[in-house]
Amino acid sequence: MLAKYTTVSKSNPEIQKLRRKGKEDNVKWIDRAINELADKKNTDQSYVLLLGATDTLGWRLRLGQSHLRFDMLPSYWSTSAFLKVSPKGIAQSSILHVPLFQPETGMFASERNGVVETPLQHLEDPDHWKNIAVIALPKSQKEVLSKLDQFEKGRAYVDALENVLRWLAFSWGVARTPNPIHDGIGLPSACMLETLYASAGLDLTPGLETRASSPEAIWATAMFWYDYYTKNNVQPPKGRYWTPHEYKIEDGK
Amino acid sequence: MAYLMARPVLGALDEIKLWVGMFGVAQPPAVEFTVDGAPCLPATVDGLHPIRDRQRGKGYLNYQGLFTFKTRGAGCEHHIVVRAGGSFEPCTLRVFSLPAKVPQKMEGSFKILLSSCYCTETDEADVGRFIQRLPIRPDIALFAGDQVYLDQLPFETLPTTEDELRQVISSKYQRNWTSAFTNVASLQSALAKAPAVCLPDDHEFWNNYPWPQFWKRGTQTAPTPGGGVNIWADAALEMFQDYQVGGSAQKPWLRVDIEPLFMLFLDTRSYRKQDFDDPFGLMPEEAEQAFKHWASELIDCQKQGIPRIGVLSTGQALLVKTPFFDEMGDAELSSYKKQFKVIIETLERLGQHGIQVVFLTGDVHWSRVAQATCVKRGQITLTEVICSPMSLLVTPGADQVARLKDHLGSIFGERKRWPLHPEVELAPAYIGEKSFRPVGQKGWSGNQVAVLEFSCLGLGVELNVTYHPVTAPASPATKAGPFTLLNT
């Protein structure tokens, strides 16, 4: 499955680069991006974060998604999350995601379908999370979050924990586990995002099965499938990104 | 003995429609209804009509009618009691009104029960009870053809006088429709499972209707004053209308929309002609117009950015080969070249607009889910779901050979679970003038009923199909999907 197939010739003009300033951390960068994306006329929007880590796990996850790209290069992204914006400001905000490493304490993972709320500060380090993007989508935070409880209790619909195990096994090279992408098994946080938005009436990755979603698919849709939204009278995604980290593969460039 | 029978039939979104049959009474008493304990008058008054199982002028003993009621709201349960004087046992039903729209994925699904091809003589599992006991409540039930086999058993000879012929056909219907009263295995409980729509296929008349079958007396062409193929055909059509459709105003199509599904059920059998090149060889002009109108509305919605998914059903499949022996054997939709071209071109136009269509049918005696790419669009836009049969018809000779082959095969391996059922066929390389190219398919042999579950997912729909093998005791179900149906 190649996610970038589209008839549009240009990438989404509403998704623009936003350079990191000096030693600016990710929380401050997100704050700046949100300020640029905020729409005073239309406050019904919410934000998805895409992040690309530079460690070995990040490499495995980014490589796994390379099959979704025409150039077969590793994805910029190793994970994604819902940005739960706090009224007190971005610094006090948190993210909702389904991490591959589930917390040892607290509610057992099966009771919340793997969903974890983590302070945004967790993503602060720009040396670890070098690649970053904020995508603004035309659904209010309240509407999206109203579906969270159903997702947490609805393992019958999407079992995010199955995706956790498959991606961990692939990342660690356990028992010759093949790339989960080939079996239509997406990254768990992306599947959570896909389900929440789809239930709220918005496709993050049109045409892709909910359980097969991934940060790369979300990125490709936002960048190249934006006319799908226009055709259906929905405001296309907007975004800001900064992707300084690539693997040094330069053939064909 | 006098019987009163009622079953829900598919109607408009805001109504509950009941088919009421009264059997064994010369003067039918008035029918009375209570809904949720309170007396209730039908919203429309069409009354009872004689079931035309006798010649005009002779006394009728069986009656049918359609009665509609306003619902209390979408997706509500209605407890209905039907009474017809003291000589009839009251008939009790629990009927759910249709949902206003297809639920979001995590909130449930809109369910269609799909079944076809029911032969009483081979029903060992009691299909009616099997369907009634399925631990799932479909929102609608689609009986996609061959709910009766008028030409079974194979060596049975039907009477040649019109009066007797009509009574034999009516008694075959009564066996299937009122089985609970006669305590035989048949369809009555299945018909009450959910508001139903019944489409006819050939065995509502005879094999490969309207083409004569030389080995079956009575199927030969002998035009009647009304323009029918012969007296059997006239009687079979009227009995289909009386038992399966009901009421007095009948049309060869039914349209029901449950957002975002535009559903069209087309009768492509009752008005077939003995001319493969006739422009209306499969269905009359009014049915074709309804089909074109359905397609135009889907395109209009798509242009306005309101994506809608098409659901189309007929008594025969699309993604199958055109048979060589179409007059003698079994003509398919594609045998009727001119009107099939209209169907395919219309579906292709929908495909070119990126509109998804789900095609539902039965007929072939195997089950399959297949998807096809619209070649001009380069994307999958057609999903065909076939479910057949509920119980397999008797085929003398072929059945005995299949049993023998299975017996001999068992010496070296395992016996087949369904030795008499044909193997699932592969879809041909292309459909139409290279309009659609089948790309993926999964099939099953054996007696089955299917449940299709549609859930809204973003601006599209997710479809899951579950096939339940008809066995007693029940066997594990098999699944196909999820299929993401998204207009692009």
Image (spheres, grey):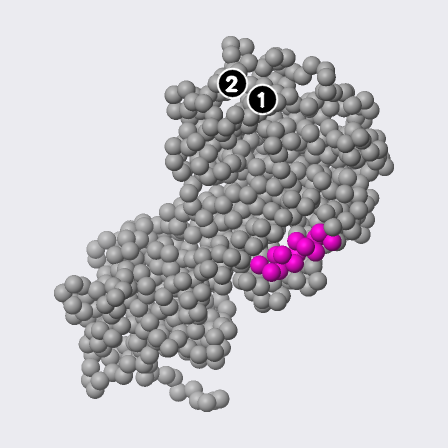
Q: Are marks 2 and 1 in contact (CB under 8 Å)?
A: yes
Instruction: Identify the element where label 1 is drawn.
Output: loop
Give the main secondary structure, helix, strand or loop, of the magenta stretch.
Answer: helix
Q: Locate the N terminus of chain B by quadrant.
A: top right
Apparent side of residue B353 relative to residue B160 in the rendered image (left or right): left
Subunit under mark 1: B
Respond whether the residues carrying marks 2 and 1 are from the same subunit: yes
Apparent side of residue A69 relative to residue B218 in the rendered image (left or right): left
Question: Which amino acid, mark 2?
Answer: Val
Q: Which mark is residue B48?
A: 1
Q: What's the residue at 65%, 48% (across, down)?
A: B288
C-alpha span from label 2 to label 1: 9 Å
Which label's residue is closer to the chain start, 2 or 1?
2
Number of other residues with Cα within 10 Å of mark 1, as a class: few under 14, some 14 to 19, many 20 or more: many
From the top left corner, tell me how far across and down residue B380 is, in percent.
Answer: 56, 62
Instruction: Identify the element where label 2 is drawn.
Output: loop
Q: Nearer the viewer, residue B117 or B488?
A: B488
As displayed, is residue B20 above or below residue B457?
above
From the top left corner, tell me how far across and down residue B28 is, in percent.
Answer: 58, 15
Q: What's the residue at 34%, 61% (across, down)?
A: A193
Residue tagged 2: B31
Tell me, yes or no, whether the highlighted magenta stretch contains residue B345.
yes
Tell me, yes or no, whether the highlighted magenta stretch contains residue A244.
no
As displayed, is residue A36 above or below residue B435?
below
- Can I make out residue B176 in this image? yes
The magenta region covers B338-350
Number of other residues with Cα within 10 Å of mark 2, as a class: few under 14, some 14 to 19, many 20 or more: some
